[in-house]
Image: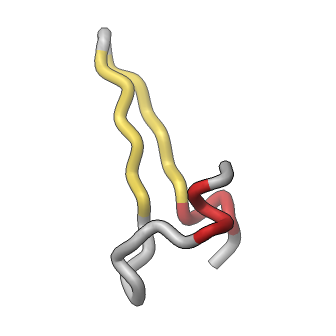
Amino acid sequence: MTDSDVIRTRTEDHIFEVTLDRPKANAIDLVTSQR
């Protein structure tokens, strides 16, 4: 899984949605937190 696969974003109307896709470690690691 690449870094771009881990964080996905989308915008719908006035809503900005951020999805963190880390199924093995449902948490934010150091690299992800610095993006």
Q: Is residue 35 above or below residue 17?
A: below
Relative placement, left or right, of 6 versus 4 is left
Q: Quadrant of residue 27?
A: bottom left
Scheme of colours in the image: secondary structure
Give coordinates of residue 34: x percent, y percent.
Answer: 66, 53
Outermost residue toward the bottom in this view: 24
State the residue at coordinates (42%, 59%). Answer: 20
Q: Is residue 18 left or right of residue 29?
A: left
Q: How many marks?
A: 0
2, above or below 13, in the image: below
Is residue 6 depicted above or below 8 in this figure?
below
Locate the N terminus by quadrant: bottom right
Q: Position of residue 35 (x, y in %)?
A: 67, 49
Front-most of 26 and 19?
Answer: 26
Q: Tell me where residue 29 appears, x and y as whole percent.
A: 54, 72
Q: Residue furthest top?
A: 14
Residue in the foreground of this view, choosing between 22 and 30: 30
Toward which corner of the image does residue 15 lie, by quadrant?
top left
Would residue 1 be found to the left or right of residue 26 on screen?
Answer: right
Give the residue displayed 40% in from the left and 84% down from the top: 25
Judge by depth and name the residue closer to the eye, 11 or 28. 28
Q: Which residue lies at the image location 40% right of the left edge and 89% below the top edge?
A: 24
